[in-house]
Image (spheres, rainbow, N blue to C red):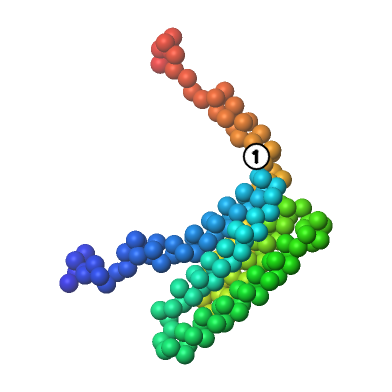
Amino acid sequence: MTQDTADPLDRPSKASFLRRKLPYVAVLLLAIVGVAYTNISHQSISGFWEFLAIAIGVVCVVTQWPNVDDRKARFRLIWTQALHWVTFLVIMNIMLLPHVQSMVPAPANSLVLLMLLALGTFLAGVNLLSLEICFLGLAMALSVPAIAWLKQSALFLLLAAVLLIGLGITFWPRRGKNDTA
């Protein structure tokens, strides 16, 4: 067989690649949406962060399930991830206590919770020897300073966009009825 007529089952398709990466992308998008909502509403959404921690734990188990061979190893996978994420849920709920929240504004609190989730995700990836989960934790951690920068720079970015649009309108080549070129 030539390279052009190779069996399509030998190569993983783009759809199967996207299907395998979908849980990681979904968790990252949910985390960013949670921080954005908290920054806009100035309210802490503790139930959302707890749901996200549980969802990340489920993603860790589900994505690693095919890599585990026997029943004992699967039992260990479930219990270690359950203990890992329960620990982070307890820490997150400590951050959500009224006395702690009174010292930390709601937008900063959401960034702290996202950083805790990022740390938990990265450590789960290290424990599971999963580069994808480690990368997810790293991406979540890097989104914290990016979100803080974006929030501080939103007015600057808006002004820069208006300036660029204005320059584009001003210097855009125009062809009028009187042009003879």
Horizontal side of 72 relative to 98 (left or right) equals left
Residue 166's place in the image compared with 76, above or below, is: above
- Quadrant of the image containing the N terminus: bottom left
How packed mark 1 is, by other alpha carbons closer than 10 Å (few <14, some 14-19, many 20 or more), is few
Residue 57 coordinates in the image, percent (x, y): 54, 71
Q: Amino acid at mark 1?
A: Leu
Closer to the camera in the image, 20 or 100? 100
Residue 30 coordinates in the image, percent (x, y): 55, 57
Label 1: which secondary element: helix
Q: Quadrant of residue 15?
A: bottom left
Q: Quadrant of residue 44?
A: bottom right
Q: Which residue does the image show at 44% across and 64% down from the upper left?
A: 21
The mark total stands at 1
- Quadrant of the image containing the C terminus: top left
Residue 145's place in the image compared with 70, above or below, is: above
Q: Which residue does the image show at 46% across and 77% down from the upper left?
A: 64
Q: Which residue does the image show at 56% across and 75% down from the upper left?
A: 125
Residue 11's place in the image compared with 38, above or below, is: below
Residue 163 coordinates in the image, percent (x, y): 63, 31
Closer to the camera in the image, 19 or 138? 19
Q: Which residue is mark 1?
A: 157
**Residue 149 shows in this picture:** no
Horizontal side of 129 relative to 36 (left or right) equals left
Residue 175 coordinates in the image, percent (x, y): 44, 17
Closer to the camera in the image, 31 or 158? 31
**Residue 109 shows in this picture:** yes
Q: Which residue does the image show at 54% across and 60% down from the upper left?
A: 28
